[in-house]
Amino acid sequence: MENKNDNIIKDDPTADIKEESEIVNDTVKIAETSLEDKLIDSQDKLLRALAETENQRRRHETETREAFEYGGFNLAKETLSVLDNLQRAYQSIKNDENLKNSKDLDKFLENFEIIEKDLITIFEKNNIKKINCLNEKFDPHNHQAMLEIEDENVNPGTILKEIQPGYFYKDRLLRASYVAIAKKKDTKIDEKVEK
């Protein structure tokens, strides 16, 4: 036997409308939350894009400024070899036994010195400065130790000899100075020798 109430509920058209209304409300709520999520997501993407654009603009400004300031860095670095070769040639000619007896040697060496001074003047005008390192404390950022010399008269780590000069281009290291530094006399070796 069927219950009369069962037929009434099944046949009640308002029940179907209520169910459909609840489904539509749920769908609208889902759509509203997804629209809000989409809006938040879009705002986030926009902010990220704006931040990326600003970062690119700053990077470009920095690169442009550095290109103007340090554009001659590579040329300056390459030009140092000209000065080095000129100084080596000067020393080689000055110390050559065959040329020491030549009457024109002093005049020739004087011309080398003039060229060297001109090059150094050009370097200084273009912000290429020599690193003064003799009797200074060793700095691994500006110096490269090539050898150690035992010397009790100075503090360990003091630069005793400059093997090759170093240079700065404005505030950047162009080339490190090759140096010889002082070290304490090794007493352990002396004790072994005495035994």
Image: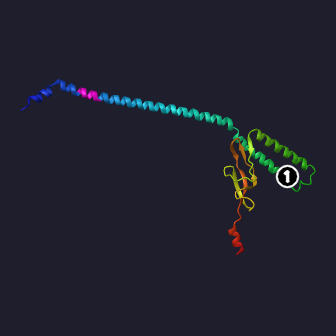
- Seen at 77% across and 41% down, the residue is 124
**How far from the left and from the top, in percent, is residue 55?**
55, 34
How many marks the image carries: the answer is 1
The image shows residue 98, relative to residue 122, as above or below, that is below
State which quadrant residue 3 falls in.
Answer: top left
Q: Is residue 19 magenta?
A: no
- Seen at 31% across and 27% down, the residue is 28
Which of the image's four quarters has the C terminus? bottom right
Q: Is residue 128 left or right of residue 41?
A: right
What residue does disc 1 label? 93
Looking at this view, is 54 or 109 the one in front?
54
Q: Is residue 24 magenta?
A: yes
The image shows residue 168, relative to residue 64, as above or below, that is below
* Chain part drawn in magenta: 20-26
Magenta residues, dominant SS class: helix
| Residue type at tag 1 | Ile
Q: Is residue 9 left or right of residue 184?
A: left
Which of the image's four quarters has the N terminus? top left
**How far from the left and from the top, in percent, is residue 30?**
32, 30
- SS at badge 1: helix
